[in-house]
Every structure is written in C-alpha cells, then in structure tokens.
Amino acid sequence: VKPAPFEYDDPATTEEAVALLADRGDEAKVLAGGQSLVPLLNFRLARPDRLVDVNRVSELDYLRIDGDVLRIGALTRHSALERSADVAARAPLLTDAVRLVGHVQIRNRGTVGGSAAHADPAAELPVAFAALGASFRARSTAGERTIPVDDFFVTHLTTALQPDELLTEIEVPLPPAGTGAALVEFSRRHGDFALGGAAVLLELDDGACRSCSIALLAAAPTPLRARAAEELLAGRKVDERAAADAAAAAVADVHPTGDIHGSSDYRRGLVEAMVRRALLRAAERAREAA
Amino acid sequence: VIGASLPRKEDGPLLTGAATFVDDAWPPDALHAHVVRSPVAHARIASLDASAAAAAPGVHAVLSAADLPEGTPPIPMRMFHDAPLEGYLQPPLADGVVRYSGEPVAVVVADSRYLAEDAAELLDVEYEELPAVTSPEAAVAEDAPLLHPAAGGNRAASFTIEHGDVDAAFAAADVVVERRFEVGRHAAVPLEPRGLVAELGDDGILVVRGAAKIPHVNRRILARLLGWPEERVRLVELAVGGGFGGRGEFYPEDFLVPLCAVRLGRPVAWTEDRAEHLRASNHSREQVHEAAIALAADGRFLALRSRFLNDTGAYIRTHGLVVPGMTAALLPGPYRWQAYRCDVGQVLTNKTPAGTYRAPGRYEANFVRERLIDEAARRLGADPVELRRQNLVAPEEMPYPTRTHLDGHGVVYDSGDYPRLLDRAASAFGWDGRRAERAAAPARRRGVGIAFFVEKSGIARWEYARVRLGPDGDAQVYSGSASVGQGVETVLAQICADGLGVGYDRVSVVHGDTAVVPDGMGAFGSRATTLGGSAVLESSARLRTRLLELAAERLEIAPADLVLDGDRVGAAGAPAVSVPLAELVADGLAEEAVFTSEDMTFPYGVHAAAVEVDLETGGVEVERYVVAYDVGRAINPQLVEGQVVGGAAQGVGGALLEELAYDGDGQLVAGSFMDYLLPTAVEAPAVEVVLSEDAPTERNPLGAKGAGEGGCAAAGAAIANAVADALGAEVVRLPLTPERVLGLVREGGRG
C-alpha cells in the first residue's frame, strides 16, 4: 500500500493555497490532517496528480467566539476543539461530537475543516454542524463565499466546494443559553465510525419543547436534519413517549446504506434508538441548565 | 528459580528499541519485492504480459509462474500429511488458474516498494472468471464448481472418529439437543506482519532473515523447493511481533523472495502490508457443525456427535488436516461419554487458505459442545455448573483414555482434577450470586456463561537443546525452539539456571538461527516450554553431572558433595576447597539432548463471562471475565498469566468482533482494519486469572503443560453462553455481531 506518484506543494498562506488550486484545482487534492486522504492514497483509491498540503497555513488554525457566533478555522485540530473550554460552555454539542472522533492520535492530527470537507455522513462533526445550522466559508482566487450547511453537504463524500475553492472557516451560530445538547451514537468499537447516531439541540419551556434541532448520523448520504420529528415535538412535553414518537418520525423516510456491520433495517432501528436517547439526554441537560 | 515470576530477558532490548525486527534488517542495497495478487476469486489466466511492468522505471525483475524453475513443487504439508491432499497444495505462483482473491500471480522486484507497486499496475493479466464457491456447504453441493478437478472434489478429505454405539445412545436418551453451529472465519493477525530479507552470500549460502516459529522446518522446505542441499540455506529468526499460529508457516513468499535474491544476486526485502496480510496469511476457524448431545433425564451425558465441514479455503497449506483433526479429537472435552462420533470434511472454497490460529480446532469445538450443554441444561432446568460437574471425568480416572485420536496417536488425558478447578472458577467468578442478577437499565440485560475445556500441548514430539558452560561461569542455551513473543528465552533460562545450578542472570539463550542451532522443531502448539524446556533441563542436568565428575576427580571429593558457585566448583559448605572453571574446563563444556515424548499433555480450564447486552443496539459489553487454567507447573507464573490474558482478548475478539467476511463473488469484504475489527484496550475485558497447578504431568520432567492457548480456547463458548443466558435465546453462530444479537433479542422475546 504505497501511493501512486503525485506532485506536492506546501503553501504557507491561504493566498498561496488558493493560487495553487486555481492553477491545477481539478487535478489537486487538499491535504490537511490526512486522516482520511492518506489511507485513500495508500490504497490507490484516490490518485490526485497534486497534493496541496495546507498544514503550514497557520492563519487557518483558530477558534474564536465572535458575539453569538463561533468561528472555527479550517485547520483547527480536533484536539483543540475538544479541549476548548469556550466550546464546552457555549457549544457543548461540538464537544460531545469531537470526543467521539476516532482516537487521540487521530484527533491530534485531524482537522475540523478536513472532516467537513471529507463529508463522511458517518462522521460526527458534520452531523453536529447540521444540527447547529453552521455555515462554511470558502475562498478561491475569485473571492469568498459562505455556504449554508443544507447546501454544503451534497452527497456521500461530496460537498459544494469547487475544485479551486479552499474551505477556510466554519461559522457556528451559538445556541441560546439553557439549550440542552447531546450527540449519541453506537459504534462497534470505541473510536470506530458509528453505525448510527443523532445530534440534538433542545430548548425547553417549562418542560415542553420550545425549539429543537435533530440531525441524523449515518442515516443518509449526508448528515440529515429530521424536520418532521422536530415539528412533531414542537410544544410537546419531552418525555419518553414524546421522544419515542419523534424518533419514529425521524426515521420514517430514512434508508441507510447497509454493509457487513449492519443492514439498512438494522441501521434504521439503531438511528431511531439513538434519536430517542439523544432527545432524552438533551432534555435532561436542558433541565440541568435551567 | 523455576516457579518464580522473574522479569523477562526479552524486555530490555524490546523496550529500549535495541531489538531488530525484519524491517530493521534491510541491507542498504536491498531491492524490494511486491507480490501481485489476483483481484478475483476464481478465474483462468487467459494471458499474462509482463513486458510493460518489466520495462517500468527501477524494475529489476518480474516473475510469473512461467519464470519459476521447471518442476518447482507446490508447498508441502509439514504436519498431518494425508496423501489424498497432495493434489490440493498451493504452487508458489498461480499456474493457469487463480483460486482466491489475493493469490500470488507475479512478483515485481524494484529499487523501492513504491516503484514496484507502480510497475505492478502495468502487469497485464487477462482473467476469464469462473464461478466462485464461497461457503463450505456450497462447496459440497452436487453441482458445485470444482476448485481442483484434477485432484478430485471440493471435499479434499473425510474421516470419522468414533467409539461406542452412538445411535443406540441417542435412541435411549431422554433429552436430545441438536443444532447447526457456525464459527466465523477469523485469523491470528499479529501486530507485526510477515517479512523477509533474502541474500545470497559470496560463500554460496542463501541467508533468509525474518524466519519465525519453525526455522529448521522451513529451511528444509525452502531447500526442497529450490532443489538445493539444506547446507546452502540458512534461516535466521529476528525479533518477532507475534505469531499465534499464522505467522511463520511456509507461505509462497517464503520461496519467492529468496528465489528473487538468488536470481538477481542482490538482497531482496519484502514486508507484507496489512491489507496483504488479511488476504495472504492463513485464515482460520471457519466451521459448520450439525451437532447433537444426548442425555438421560437425571442429567447424565450419554453421547455426543457432530458432522462438520472445515472451510480450508482454496488450497491445502502446511497444516494439512491439523485443524479439523484437533476439533474431532478434542470435541468430547472433559466429560465422560458412552459414545461419540465425529464425521469430518475438509473442504475447499475460493477463499484465502486456512491454517492454525491459537487453540486451532478447539475454539470451534468448545463453542459447539459447551453451547449444546447449556441448551440441555436449560431443557432440564439444571444449573449449567452443576450439570457440567456431574459429568466431568473424575481425578481417580486419570490417566483417562478418551478413545479419540490425533494424527494416529490416541488421546489419553494425563492428569487433572476437573471438579476442583470448576469449583475454584465458579467461586472466583461468584457464579451463584451473579446468576441471580438481572437487567440493570431498562434497555439492557445481563447474563453469565461458563465453559470447560481440555487443551492439548506439545505437539510434534521432540525438541533439541544444547547447553554450554563457559570458563567464566556464564551459560548459553542453544534451543531448537523459537520466540514468538511468548518469553521463551526467559523460561528456558530459568530452567537452565535450576538444572545446571547457575544464576538466572548468567544464562543467555540462543535460538532461531539454523547455522548456530543444528536442529529444532520450533514454537507452536504450546510446545516451547514442555518439550523445549524439558530438552534444556535434560542437557543442563547432563552438563552438571559431567562437570561435577570432572571436579570430583580433581578435588577428590564425591560429586554429591560439590557445588557450582559462579566460576568455580567447590565443596559444599567449604568454599576454600575449590577449582576455577577456567582450570577445569578451559574451553567450556557442553552437553546436548533431544527430549522426546510420545504423548502430548492436556492442560484444562474454565472460562466464565458476565455480559450486558443493549437490547436496542445489540451491543455486548463484557463486564467480567475469569479464566481458571491448570498448567501442571508454571515455570514463570506471570508469563502464564500474560498468555491467558492475551489469549482471552483474542478469543473475545473472535466471539464478538472479528470476521473475515466474503461476498458472493468471493471478495473479502473485511480487507482492512476499518472492517476487520480487533478488540482494542477498551473492548478487551479485564481478565482475572486463576492459575492452578493441581495436576503436574508425568509426561515430561518439568511436570509442565503448555500455557499458550487456554486463554483463547473457550472464549467463544463462554461469551456465547453468557449472551444466550442474557437473552433467553439460542446462540448458534459466532461472531455475535450487533445485528445478530438483535435477532436473538427478538427470538428471546418470542421464547
């Protein structure tokens, strides 16, 4: 398992990086933490002619709270997100999510932007971004644009990023104080990609759902917002029964892809259970926060 | 120092990075080999054109079957030979037909592995695909495509082991449980994959580094395949990152890499990558049983029978009939049976060839038998521990002839107090209290399972050792055994220290170099201590006797009154009266011994597991794991415990996680560590070891029985019984993947 030949550049600035992508974007791949790309290269499943290694672009390595928005530079390592007290306090869903990403070594190397751009629907951060309603800033030599999460994830391993665009930042609107958050998943081993899961944000008003956001993990080709379930829950007291109803609604039209670790039917049932558990945990946390 | 948990001699070099693994031994001018493997499971090779690959940058050679020396034989069996199997052996490179995805088709040798892999993409092979056989039952179906039509059908061998009137016993039984059981294909998967560096020296001797497990045996095989005298081949064992049965057998690469080195006159290195390892190294464990147990109403076991197929993949490899032979010989376990029958089929499929893996054949057998017993217990309303106790062979019946046999030798259990060990295990586990416990959280349920097993140790019945004492009082052990990470140097040094009467720190152990150790059998089947250790003990004792006789002559003191004390021999209790070794044996003194034991020894043990099952995810958590194991005599108890803990981790992996699954086209779909799931530190249970030395064997002078495999042997059985207990459902298939467990949840709900 050795990669096919490729050319290699390691620009030091965003500007240089996007210039390289403008030049040869169609044939190039951006290398960040390499936790997904390098295995694909070694198995020769990905054979880009050129790698644009952005690890030296340190200007993209930051975490910043800007009013009611959390700004995550694309090169931020998972471990930085995991250790951020601000994130834990203001966007604990991301803390829940990032703790479930791989193992320590993977989180030390893997980047938040890389995880988003790789767009694996079984990955935790994309599903958390879906629940949070994040936006994605991309730059090219032509300029900059912001892509809302519903448009960003196109399908399995595919985003709306153009070949000449570099993901630079993820903008996360911070949930109001008192919001309960939970990301719950099931994987065969600690650190594996989950077979199913759910991310939930829940605001309670006297025990009843004031607002909620539910996103499903490994249920569809992209992270999937379960809007029918969210609507069903609106105004209802969030108890076992309501959570079960919402979970059933969440997977009513879901057809996960099966593999040797679980069939589509198994995974649908699993996602349903995870939605229920995530809702109950989020409700508990919302009550604690109140 | 026998019996003391001394620190391992191996650890210093390993922990300081001084140990040399095969990848550390690449000569600077080494070329690198890459094996091109079949992408399909079964096909005729219509054409093979290597010209573009051979012309690629940095390429020195491309070899396909047509380039092998005329008359190169297939890789022979080294154990359990059986003439009808000869036609099913694997050629080093596919010759006209490929029979599994991953079969070597060509070798590319280049300046680097990168260039070799680039060139491999230019190899032009046209495959005319044939239908693939992907399960043992499909293999023996009437219209199954044949893998080796010239040799015969897909059932390469059949045999029966039988005693008593099985049919009559079943007819007279009050309770009969009959089930179909499946054990999933999984494999040893050591931390370090295989690797070799081969170099033809100026002296005409071919040196192959990276040997493991059985250097002397593989030297013989390599010489035979090359058509060379053995003296021109030297195998050298370096540090080895785990064996477990899979690593160290003679594989196609063990011929191809040396052949390339000979052809090119340059050192050639090859390291198996992980994706290769999962398709190329021996698989194991895949069996399908139709098995039944017959009992009297009072719980007495009457008879046991099984008809099973062992899926050995596309070729017969070095192990011949070892795995199914072990299953058939040891399926009866520790119990008394009036009658027993096992009908065995060794079956070919278009999958990676299979061989042994820690507790080969027994992991499978223990699962089948112990599941049947638990189902019978449920039927009778009996406690699983009590039902087992009632039927155990009693200590006073030892030695106990099972009336089964293994490779022509009758299986006679040497010693054991089975009821006592069962009591100790049940008490350590807290069986009675735990059984009463039930579900903790609403969506979870708890269960407990127990399994008793008899292991075997010390197969291939001799080992060589030479012990030398230098004039400085340092001793060297030259052993025919091998290190696969088990601590053999430590154990042999302990034995030598006691046998010779020298300090442990003064003993060093040499093994694994065919130029230094004249002969040996190696390390497999839990034999290194029992046979290798006994050979060291005998040669140490002989050396001591000779040494004291020499000193007795010099000092005119009876040998019985003399002691070896550092670099002198002197009178016991009168240190002033002594002679330095440098005077007595100026060039040192050595003795050798070949220890032979016609019969194996039979350690035995109990696994007990407590699990919690998530009724919504199908996840199984092992909450508690106890292994009680009687090894007769533990030379180094800490190493025995380590063996048990590691074995249990592997066994639990096979019970819950690991499965080399294939699709209907014969493609391995668990071909990387993304999908082939080994237990990590999180999934491996904390294992509590009850080490027992109740029943030393009389079949070797140490009294020791092999300790290598008992930690693994009954893990599938114990976990399966615990999950069955939790769910009130019948577990008939391993591994217990979450989806299969959920199926059992539904089944249990109905029951």
Image (tube, grey):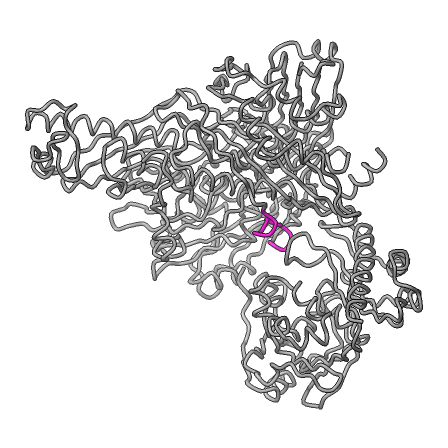
Q: Position of residue A48 (x, y in %)?
A: 61, 72
- Left/right placement of residue B565 relative to residue A61 reads left
- A14 left or right, relative to A246: left
- Would residue B286 appear left or right of B587 to someone viewing this image? right
Q: Position of residue B599 (x, y in %)?
A: 43, 20
Quarter of image, res A19: bottom right
> From the viewer's perspective, is residue B735 above or below residue A161?
above
Q: Nearer the viewer, residue B711 or B229?
A: B711
Q: Is residue A271 above or below residue A143?
A: above
Q: Is residue B697 left or right of residue B51?
A: left
In this orientation, which residue lies closer to the viewer: B278 or B59?
B278
Residue B362, x across and y down, in percent: 57, 30
Q: Which residues are magenta?
A: B673-684
Q: Residue at x 50, y 41 (%)?
A: B246
B497 w.r.t. B81: above or below: below
**Residue depicted at x 66% and y 67%:** A98
- Considering the image in quadrants, where does the C terminus of chain B appear? top right
- Is residue B375 within the magenta segment? no
Residue B392 appears in the figure: yes
Residue B516, percent across and down? 27, 40
Residue shown at the point (14%, 24%) measured from the top left = B559
Q: Locate the N terminus of chain B by quadrant.
A: top left
> Measuring 46% from the left and 28% from the top, which residue is drawn there?
B457
Q: Is residue B133 visible?
A: no
Vertical comparison of A165 with B48: above or below: below
Q: Report the magenta stretch's main SS.
A: loop
